[in-house]
Image (cartoon, rainbow, N blue to C red):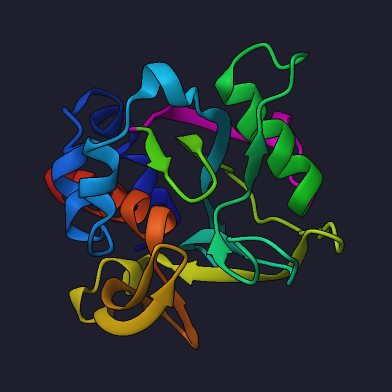
């Protein structure tokens, strides 16, 4: 989709009712929803994080920015994700967390991002994080500067590919809470995007389908 065409839909995106957990469920790994339902949040007290679903023009076409996490000793090692991270005490609100972390991780300044709205939070049982996604856009093409100790690469996801249902696939894999299960996700070039990021992408995709 041409980026100028996408911009015409932003008012509708701001006001449409989000599909929320109905969209999340489509991309939830087996047992994930059961784990969430069984979680007593009054006892668990999840850590908070925020991410930015960033849309921007590239050669006039709308793209979505994803990052490849570096390899490290943790449950999210080498995964595809949105730029974002943990809430800090000095953040004014969750949207500021998403903007600050995006600036730190991929070099996009907060002043160049227009935040459209918050999307539905996603709980991640393995790391005990509640993640709050925000949708935003930059009106101009971007030059990315990666924080190399956390970001191994940038994955530029064309909007047309994102809206194509043929990229939704299932694969069998080992997760932190199951030996070998079938997991739904998005095939983005050579990358398989699953888990919380896929759940957020699912809500974004279903929301866009409502307004386009």
- Depth check, front residue: 99 or 184: 184
Q: Tell me if residue 128 comes above or below residue 189 in the rendering.
A: above
Q: Is residue 208 visible?
A: no
- Depth check, front residue: 208 or 78: 78
Which quadrant is the N terminus positioned in?
bottom left
Q: Is 9 left, or right, of 96 in this rendering?
A: left
- Depth check, front residue: 161 or 101: 101
- Tell me the magenta residue range: 107-120
Q: Is 175 left, or right, of 93 in this rendering?
A: left
Residue 110 painted magenta: yes
Q: Tell me if residue 81 comes above or below residue 171 in the rendering.
A: above
Pinpoint residue 64: horizontal percent, then vertical percent. 49, 59
Q: Tell me if residue 52 comes above or below residue 168 in the rendering.
A: above
Pinpoint residue 84: horizontal percent, then vertical percent. 63, 43
Which residue is at 69% across, 43% downward? 102
Which residue is at 41% across, 78% downward? 174
Pinpoint residue 78: horizontal percent, then vertical percent. 64, 72
Which residue is at 23% across, 64% downward? 30
Q: Is 199 left, or right, of 212 in this rendering?
A: right
Q: Is residue 30 visible?
A: yes
Residue 196 painted magenta: no
């Amino acid at each position: 989709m041409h980026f100028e065409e996408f911009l015409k839909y932003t008012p509708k995106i701001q006001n449409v009712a989000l599909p929320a957990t109905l969209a999340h469920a489509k991309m939830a790994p087996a047992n994930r929803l059961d784990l969430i339902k069984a979680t007593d949040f009054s006892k668990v007290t999840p850590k908070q994080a925020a991410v930015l679903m960033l849309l921007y023009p590239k050669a006039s076409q709308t793209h979505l920015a994803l990052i490849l996490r570096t390899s490290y000793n943790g449950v999210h090692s080498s995964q595809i994700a949105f730029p974002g991270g943990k809430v800090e005490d000095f953040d004014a609100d969750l949207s500021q967390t998403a903007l600050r972390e995006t600036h730190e991780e991929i070099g996009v300044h907060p002043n160049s991002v227009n935040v459209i709205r918050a999307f539905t939070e996603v709980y991640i049982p393995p790391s005990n994080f509640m993640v709050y996604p925000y949708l935003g856009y930059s009106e101009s093409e971007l030059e990315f500067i990666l924080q190399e100790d956390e970001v191994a690469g940038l994955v530029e996801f064309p909007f047309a590919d994102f809206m194509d249902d043929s990229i939704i696939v299932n694969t069998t894999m080992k997760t932190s809470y199951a030996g070998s299960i079938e997991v739904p996700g998005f095939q983005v070039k050579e990358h398989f995007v699953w888990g919380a990021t896929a759940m957020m992408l699912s809500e974004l995709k279903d929301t866009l389908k409502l307004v386009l």
